[in-house]
Structures are given as C-alpha cells and as structure tokens.
Amino acid sequence: MSDLIIRQNGQAGHITLNRPKALNALTWEMCLAIENALDTWRSDPAIALIMIDGAGDRAFCSGGDIAEMYAAGQRGDLDYGRRFWRDEYRLNAKIHSYPKPIVTFLHGFTMGGGVGVGCHGSHRIVCESSQIAMPECSIGLVPDVGGSLILAKAPGACGEYLGLTGDRMDAGDAIYAGFADHYVPQDDWETLKAQLAETGEAVIPKHPTPESRLQKWQPDLDAYFISGSDSDATQRFDKLSARNAPLAQAVCRKILAAVRENPDIQTALNHEFRYTYRCVAQGDFIEGIRAAIIDRDKSPKWQPVTADQIAVMTAPLGEQGLQWEDNT
C-alpha cells in the first residue's frame, strides 16, 4: 500500500496521506512525492485547486517520522536529518506560497510536520475532532516546519504559550491562533470535497466557529509574559513547560522574536534550520526522542541551558544554510 494517494479528482489535485496505522506520520519520501505533485500541478490548466487530507479516523498527520532520525543519530549520521529537514522545509515554503488554492482537511491529530503540510495552505479546515499542536520542545526540538511564523503571528503571547508548552488546540483555538480558517463538521467533508473537485472553486460553507479557550486566556497570558501573573492559564503554562527542554524553549523564544521582526516563511524556516541542523549533535533531540518513543520512560535528562549554548544553536549557518533552489 502506498504511503500517499495522489490523483486528479475533477478539477482538483488530491493528495491523501495514507499511513493511518502510523497516524499518517510524514516520511522523507512522502515529502518529496508531495513536492513533485505540487510542482507538476502548478502549471497544469486542468487543476484549479489542491486538496490534502489524511486516511483513517485518528489523524491528518501526527508529525515527522522521527524514529528514523533517532536511528541515524545513534549511528553518528548527522546528514540524514539535515537532508530531510532541507527538503521538508522547501516543501513547507512551496505550500505557503503556492499560486493555486490549497484546501487542507485537518481531522484528529495535526502536529509538528503535519502542521507544515496542513497549516500553510490557503484554506485550512478543522472539525470537532481536530487537535493541533507544535510539541517539539517536548522532544528537544524547536517549533519548525514554518510553524514559528504562525506562532509569531498569533495574538499576544499565544505564540509563546503554544510553542513553549506544546499544548493542543481544538478547532476554536486553532482558528483563533491562526492555524486554521474554517470550521466544518466532519460529516460534511465528503460532500465538500466533491463540490471542490466539481467546481474548481475554493468556496467553503460558513459554520459557527467554536469558542476558544485560548482567546479567554490571552489577557492572562499577555500579563504573565510581561510582569507575571497567576491564573488557570499561567498555572497550565508552568505545568506543561516545566516538562520540556530548556534549551529548546530558550531558542524558541529567540526565533519568535526574530520572525516577528521579519514575518515571512523563509525567515522562519531559516531560523528554525539553524537549530535543527545542529540539534542531533549539540542539542537535546536524541535524548528527547529516547524518552518519548524509544524507552518511553517520559523522563528526559535535559542539559542545563547557558547563554553560550543559545548563541551556538542560533548562529547563522553560512554556506550550510537553506538553499531555496535545491531539489535533492
């Protein structure tokens, strides 16, 4: 069975992530195949829009396939992850800037690499089962795949809250924070996909947007990051963020500040890649994966964070930085 189903459906180019048992986790080969399809459809007059969805009931895409990155790191292979991220980030940028509408259907879990495929489209649809998150700091990584751009644009201090804790957003939160655009009940999705394919027009029916817990919390979060405060929101922040890697959290805050100064997708990905390029050899990424999915002890031993480490992990990469014309 193919990990991707790529086909033309009426006037739509239709991509289905097809690893339901793995929660549609994104492999390197899937990234390259999605990019190839988008490149082919870009100039095809028969394709008016793109639809991307995920197979199964549980997830649009739960993230990147990090088990292979762990195995490569254990072998001392630093290039595997670097090549994967180069190609994945180029795909993220193409989705963000694609000249035709990209409609994504974000049911169940949409996390990490799933955000990179699903949350840079022009029409991002969520439903009652949607759970969207950037949990990278919990495994010693930073919010990447261009997610730092969405976090930087989120209202007030919501970006810091979501990036540092990895807390999950439901449909209302995702729309409020800028990770999604439209709420459509999942029972209506197949009818909507048929309409999109038939008409070639990205017209999404209007439904009431669910309430957002994050919106209610925002004043308390804003106050917390300025002068400190105590509330349900800040207590949850303290509880969740205490579990995560201090170095990754410190770098995350620096990335968000940099992206707010120049809020575009390439700026976000360039800053993210400075960290991910180095994270296997110098960060907590391998330890984070070990604790989360290898030994599953949920007890990572994070290294203490210093100003020198932060400077090293955020320094420009020079010739090793992202080259946007590459297509490896």
Image (tube, rainbow, N blue to C red):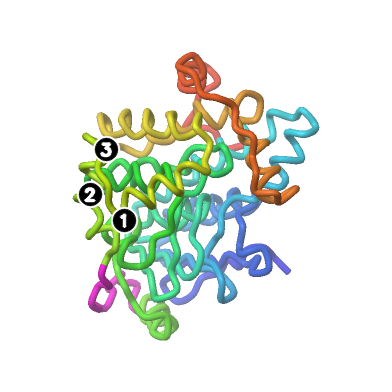
The span picked out in magenta is 199-211
Residue 2 in sight: yes
Q: Amino acid at mark 1?
A: Asp
- Name the spot of residue 122 as percent of width and height, x first: 33, 58
> Element at badge 1?
helix
Specify whether 66 is left or right of 152: right
Main structural element of the magenta stretch: helix, strand or loop? loop
Check disc 2 and report the residue beneath it. 220
Q: Which residue is mark 1?
A: 232
205 magenta-colored = yes
Q: Position of residue 37 (x, y in %)?
A: 53, 56
Label annotation for residue 225: 3
Mark 3 or 1, which is nearer the eye? Answer: 1
The kind of residue tagged 3 is Phe
Instruction: Please state if 19 lies on the left or on the right of 175 as rendered.
Output: right
Name which of mark 3 and mark 2 comes first in the sequence: 2
* Mark earlier in primary sequence (1, 2): 2
Q: Position of residue 149 (x, y in %)?
A: 34, 41
Q: Which quarter of the figure has residue 75?
A: top right
Earlier residue among tags 3 and 1: 3
Asked if labels 2 and 1 touch by Cβ distance under 8 angstroms, the answer is yes
Separation (CA) of disc 3 from disc 2: 9 Å
